[in-house]
Image (cartoon, rainbow, N blue to C red):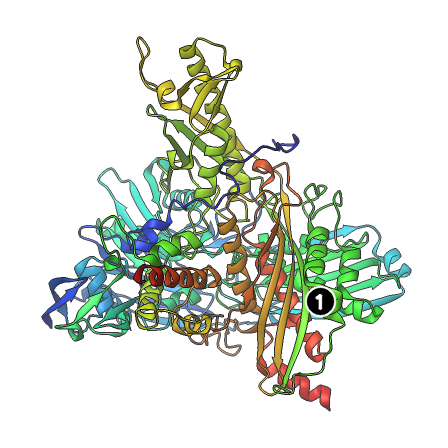
């Protein structure tokens, strides 16, 4: 049930303060244990043989030489692994994923797909054994672009799904009357937009360790955002009850959405360990994180909108085509979320949207921060800038006029409650003195005549939770111990965002104890309550509310116990900062430890409560203002300043929230200017699967970021109005940069990344 | 072929028996058990494995373990001056939120230590340049810069 009560105001003691995070001491001392740091007795090393072809049928695999190689303990191929068709991304109870994968198949669908796996006594021996596996392929015609894959007669990559290489039936959204809308328009803008294939490039390569015990129980350590989903799909595919699969994850080195699939190597690791009856570790090389990891869906967008001369938007017609790569993974979810998102951001009553997702013979695209919305809002926001130009209006003014308002129907289909976009935009306009910036003297600095400066604005909104695609459930268990300390059990993953700290802050605040008194247990599916996984910007909103609900319950029980001991009624006492006192006589009190501990005739006790929360969705908002320098001689764009103005409702931990925003901007600058995982369109080979050739913004490239967080529009669905922040920052920065480049050199770009070559070519064409 | 390598790690004399082809990174992590130093790419691109060898920062994945014979290696595990005390950089990284997922943190801490040892009053540009070989994908670097500046001031104050 969604919480719709008014948001409680109180004087916060712990919420809103940047307390010391529970996980950082271990991180700065080197003690933090990541999956790859674990070494089990007798552990073997697993490696995967990857296909050197993009589309082929396997005629034969000869593993005899590999099996005979000293130190090799097992080799798996499609001939000796269970053949179970399964979901790539195992979100439960949802239609957001496609069932199109086998652990190993007799068909290869992209260059780099695993065709066999080896376990050996060392990584080196396993690697050497891969070269001894002989695979004979029957080549099949391959398609690398969605346009080609969608042609009639194109080679079919799968025989499941709606056909025609579609991952799912086209997603269609209609609101109002599109024809009547265009009939009212004074002018129409039409354009095509496209986005590259940015890769999340988390620092910790994917890694897992499988270990079976004598009772046929699998203990599986893995770097995942969704431990319970991994448990569920491993159990399903391996034919085990959930009691026989235990997934462990302690620290993880980032994920950014992409570590929420159950990967091929995870099944293979479990099967190699089963076959050899020894623990097996499988660790990706950096190259494999690209080839066998997940990237953002490349996307082509066609957008046509009708405007009135006063700037009112009267019609929006949009078609999006997402490139899923060789498997469905999150293609359905991304297409549904990215398409539906375009109903909103800028108000328009007459909307017709169509989103398609198409298989190609390229590495798999999946979930990555921004989840389909990066692509659709890039087009919406840039075209809004173009409309302002056409109208001779300031884009800030036009955006302010058209941004969604409270009560408007959100992409999720329900009215927006906590609405903050207008406030973010206005706040940025005011603090920057935007009008003055627009009307600034544009004469180039005589010392740097080749540098053109520009300013741009990008807007975004993003939901906390995956509703309505997934009706989510958040859980938390809170225990008050005999000494008055508190244990919070959560299934939410610790990607590095500080989410566990935020949950503990919420519990401490609600219960009335110190933050230091709350211990956090996480990362063991046999121990903690079920969790849907850390994604969709929802942990603080979803699990935070569940934790608050559990804390409310234990608080009541602690007060009852204290009342008995103080010989008053629970209504006469209160609990704050670990002290329980009689409201009318604050001098009469006991500590939580005294309430919980033993006293004459009353043994010590433990009070336990669960919180379960099934929300709809809240929306967070941001307007990003950015200044760029465009070097007209080299084509290099340097982002100089970013002023991100975010509304995320109640802020639980300010430094952690800022950290999310600043990191999201780093990744957003990356995909807008330099990052693109390139697949050769003739062979399907990866051309830049490494951290030098895949160019991310690093310390020398980062601009000054002056983060502003407003608590303007709390949502009643989150704890004290808190909303998500994880994905928002990566969405707004892209169009802000593209709009700033236009402001600098008068050229519109409709794609990302916008490379120096693109800038120079455009300047040449403009000059000519 | 295996060889015994004698060296000093975090002030302690050690010997390790390693394959001659083994990287210092794998030797530290697997043979010595110092897993604080991370493997992010194994080809010298990311800086997560930065350690200090004879006073110079090194990508441990690009150095053979046998090359460390007779040398002094410092890793993140040796950064704390005492059991209950932290290096000012460690403390500043915690306060400023400079560590998110934490995977790049050990390498960045070692690089920052070297930076401040050589240059106690770094400018913003010095810090940016000093970290140009260390990839952080979570923080946008902003809070890492803040933490290093703050630690520099603290260390300066402690000296005077």
The spot of residue A439 in percent (x, y) is 76, 72
Left or right of A269 in this view: A557:
right
Q: Would residue B48 be seen by someone viewing this image from the given angle?
A: no
User: For the point 34% across and 70% down, which residue is it?
Assistant: B115
Given the image, what chain letter belongs to the residue carrying mark 1? A
Left or right of A194 in this view: A208:
left
Left or right of B58 in this view: A318:
right
The spot of residue B126 in percent (x, y) is 42, 73
Does residue A696 sit above or below A657 in this rendering? below
Task: Tell me the element at label 1.
Answer: helix
In this view, the residue in front, B1 or B60, is B60
The count of marks equals 1
In this view, the residue in front, A339 or A503, is A503
User: For the point 71% across and 53% down, which residue is it?
Assistant: A172
Left or right of A208 in this view: A10:
right
Q: Quadrant of residue A239?
A: top left
Does residue A347 sit above or below A49 in this rendering? above
User: For the point 56% across and 36% down, which residue is it?
Assistant: A719
Does residue B29 sit above or below A448 in this rendering? above
| Label 1 environment density (alpha carbons within 10 Å; few <14, some 14–19, many ≥20) | many
User: For the point 57% across and 75% down, which residue is it?
Assistant: A638
In this view, the residue in front, A498 or B118, is B118
> Which quarter of the figure is the N terminus of chain A placed in?
top right
Q: Residue furthest bottom?
A: A768
The spot of residue B76 in percent (x, y) is 27, 60
Q: Would residue A664 be seen by someone viewing this image from the given angle?
A: yes
Residue behind mark 1: A382
> Which quarter of the figure is the C terminus of chain A placed in?
bottom right
Q: Quadrant of residue A720?
A: top right
Does residue A606 sit above or below A736 in this rendering? above
The spot of residue B108 in percent (x, y) is 36, 64
Q: Residue furthest front?
A: B160
């Amino acid at each position: 049930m969604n919480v719709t009560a008014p948001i409680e105001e109180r004087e916060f003691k712990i919420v809103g303060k940047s307390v010391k995070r529970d996980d950082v001491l271990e991180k700065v001392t080197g003690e933090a244990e990541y999956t790859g740091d674990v070494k089990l007795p007798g552990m073997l090393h697993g490696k995967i043989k990857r296909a050197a072809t993009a589309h082929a049928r396997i005629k034969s695999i000869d593993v005899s030489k590999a099996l005979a190689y000293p130190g090799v303990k097992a080799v798996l191929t499609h001939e000796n692994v269970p053949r179970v068709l399964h979901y790539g991304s195992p979100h439960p109870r949802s239609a957001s994923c496609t069932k199109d994968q086998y652990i190993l198949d007799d068909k290869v669908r992209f260059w780099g797909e695993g065709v066999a796996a080896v376990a050996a006594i060392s990584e080196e021996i396993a690697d050497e054994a891969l070269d001894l596996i002989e695979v004979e392929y029957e080549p099949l015609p391959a398609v690398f672009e969605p346009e080609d894959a969608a042609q009639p007669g194109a080679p079919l990559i799968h025989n499941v799904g709606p056909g025609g290489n579609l991952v799912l039936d086209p997603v269609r959204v209609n609101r109002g009357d599109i024809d009547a809308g265009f009939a009212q328009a004074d002018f129409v803008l039409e354009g095509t937009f496209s986005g590259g294939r940015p890769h999340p490039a988390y620092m910790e390569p994917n890694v897992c360790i499988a270990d079976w015990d004598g009772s046929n129980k699998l203990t599986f350590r893995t770097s995942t955002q969704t431990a319970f989903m991994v448990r569920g799909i491993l159990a399903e595919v391996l034919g085990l009850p959930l009691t026989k699969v235990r997934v462990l994850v302690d620290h993880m080195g980032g994920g950014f959405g992409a570590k929420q699939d159950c990967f091929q190597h995870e099944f293979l690791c479990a099967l190699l360990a089963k076959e050899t009856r020894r623990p097996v570790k499988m660790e990706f090389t950096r190259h494999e994180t690209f080839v066998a990891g997940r990237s953002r869906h490349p996307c082509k967008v066609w957008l046509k909108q009708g405007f009135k001369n006063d700037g009112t938007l009267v019609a929006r017609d949009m078609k999006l085509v997402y490139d899923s790569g060789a498997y469905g993974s999150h293609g359905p979810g991304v297409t549904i979320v990215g398409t539906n998102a375009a109903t909103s951001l800028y108000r328009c009553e007459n909307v017709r949207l169509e989103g398609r997702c198409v298989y190609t013979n390229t590495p798999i695209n999946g979930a990555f921060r921004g989840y389909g919305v990066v692509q659709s809002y890039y087009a919406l926001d840039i075209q809004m800038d173009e409309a302002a130009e056409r109208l001779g209006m300031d884009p800030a003014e036009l955006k302010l006029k058209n941004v969604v308002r409270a009560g408007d129907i959100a992409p999720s289909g329900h009215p927006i409650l906590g609405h903050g976009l207008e406030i973010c935009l206005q706040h940025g306009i005011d603090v920057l003195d935007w009008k003055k910036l627009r009307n600034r003297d544009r004469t180039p600095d005589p010392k740097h005549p080749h540098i053109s400066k520009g300013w741009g604005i990008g807007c975004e909104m993003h939901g906390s939770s995956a509703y309505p695609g997934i009706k989510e459930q958040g859980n938390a268990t809170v225990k008050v111990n005999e000494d008055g300390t508190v244990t919070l059990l959560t299934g939410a993953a610790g990607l590095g965002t500080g989410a566990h700290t935020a949950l503990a802050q919420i519990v401490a605040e609600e219960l009335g104890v110190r933050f230091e008194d709350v211990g956090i247990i996480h990362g063991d599916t046999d121990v903690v309550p079920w969790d849907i996984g850390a994604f969709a910007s929802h942990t603080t909103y979803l699990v935070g509310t569940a934790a608050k609900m559990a804390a409310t319950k234990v608080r009541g029980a602690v007060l009852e116990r204290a009342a008995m001991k103080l010989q008053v009624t629970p209504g006469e006492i209160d609990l704050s900062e670990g002290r329980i006192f009689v409201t009318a006589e604050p001098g009469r009190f006991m500590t939580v430890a005294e309430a919980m501990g033993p006293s004459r005739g009353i043994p010590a006790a433990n009070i336990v409560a669960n919180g379960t929360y099934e929300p709809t969705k809240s929306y967070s908002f941001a307007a990003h203002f950015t200044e760029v320098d465009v070097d007209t001689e080299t084509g290099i764009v340097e982002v100089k300043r970013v002023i991100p103005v975010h509304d995320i409702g109640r802020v639980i931990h300010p430094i952690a929230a800022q950290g999310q925003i600043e990191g999201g901007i780093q990744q957003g600058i990356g995909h807008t200017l330099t990052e693109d995982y390139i697949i050769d369109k003739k062979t399907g080979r990866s051309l830049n699967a490494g951290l030098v050739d895949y160019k991310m913004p690093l310390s020398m490239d980062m601009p000054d970021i002056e983060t502003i967080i407003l608590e303007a529009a709390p949502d009643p669905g989150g704890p004290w109005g808190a909303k998500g922040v994880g994905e928002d920052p990566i969405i707004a920065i892209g169009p802000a940069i593209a709009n700033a480049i236009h402001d600098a050199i008068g050229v519109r770009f409709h794609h990302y990344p916008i490379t120096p070559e693109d800038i120079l070519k455009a300047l040449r064409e403009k000059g000519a | 072929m295996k060889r015994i390598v004698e060296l000093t790690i975090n002030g302690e004399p050690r010997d390790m028996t390693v394959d001659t082809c083994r990287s210092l990174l794998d030797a530290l992590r697997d043979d010595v058990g110092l897993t604080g130093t991370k493997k992010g790419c194994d080809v010298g691109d990311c800086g997560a494995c930065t350690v200090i060898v004879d006073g110079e920062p090194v990508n441990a994945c690009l150095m053979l373990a046998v090359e460390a014979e007779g040398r002094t290696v410092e890793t993140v595990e040796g950064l704390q001056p005492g059991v209950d005390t932290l290096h000012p950089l460690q403390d500043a990284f915690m306060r400023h939120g400079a560590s998110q997922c934490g995977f790049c943190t050990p390498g960045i801490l070692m690089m920052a230590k070297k930076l401040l040892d050589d240059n106690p009053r770094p400018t913003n540009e010095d810090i940016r340049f000093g970290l140009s070989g260390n990839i952080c994908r979570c923080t946008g670097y902003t809070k890492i810069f803040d933490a290093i500046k703050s630690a520099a001031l603290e260390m300066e104050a402690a000296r005077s």
